[in-house]
Image (tube, helix red, strand yellow):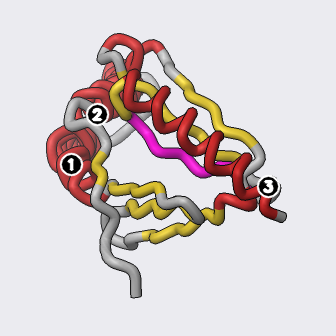
Amino acid sequence: MKREPRNRIAASVKKVWRINAGLSMLVLAIAAGVLTYFMDDWSIPTYIIYIGWALIVLASCIFIWLLPSIRWRRWRYEVFEQEIYIQHGIFIVTQTIVPMIRVQHVDTEQGPVLKGFKLATVSISTAATTHRIPALLLEEALELRDRIGTLARVEEDDV
């Protein structure tokens, strides 16, 4: 059995995840606000409105404050000469080994929020799927992309 991967993603990703969760919760709050405004016109019982708002507050606490820290603690990766080992998950921990010989190409991605924190995601594409290592410092992501690209080419030359 393999040991746990050593490398972590950037700690500032917790802020990024909190911002994304906050935006999602804002959309839910706006929808709940609309329902609250029209509750008399649409004959929505008051207890339904209270339950809805309570669920939004509870979900906000969980998704904005609790889960990002747990998610960050679980996210790990390590790149070896023959494979890439990725581990992530909160309740169900997924451990993925990507053989270098299967890597077709490697990309870095940066959305507006990641760019604001100088972070990038490394995407590793195989014929079957794309694996992502999210929220690495930009320089680290570029180095990792180049390293995986080099190792994947070396593996192809050996075949």
Q: Name the quarter where the C terminus is drawn.
A: bottom right
Q: Earlier in the sequence, mark 3 or mark 2?
A: 2
Taking the spot 27% from the left edge, 36% from the top edge, the residue there is 10
| The quadrant where residue 18 appears | top left
Q: CA distance from mark 2 to mark 1?
A: 16 Å
Which element carries disc 1, helix, strand or loop?
helix
Q: Closer to us: mark 2 or mark 1? A: 2
Q: Closer to us: mark 3 or mark 1? A: 3
Q: Check disc 2 and give the amino acid type.
A: Val
Q: Check disc 1 and give the amino acid type.
A: Ile
Look at the image and tell me whether residue 130 can be seen: yes
Whether the magenta-drawn stretch holds residue 133 is answered as yes
Magenta residues (range): 129-135
Q: Which residue is mark 2?
A: 13
Q: Which residue is mark 3?
A: 156
Q: Earlier in the sequence, mark 2 or mark 1?
A: 2
Q: Is residue 62 above or below residue 141?
A: below
Residue 110 point in image, percent of width and height? 50, 21
Q: Which residue is mark 1?
A: 62
Along the horizontal axis of the image, is 118 left or right of 66? right
Taking the spot 34% from the left edge, 27% from the top edge, the residue there is 137
Which element carries disc 2, helix, strand or loop?
helix
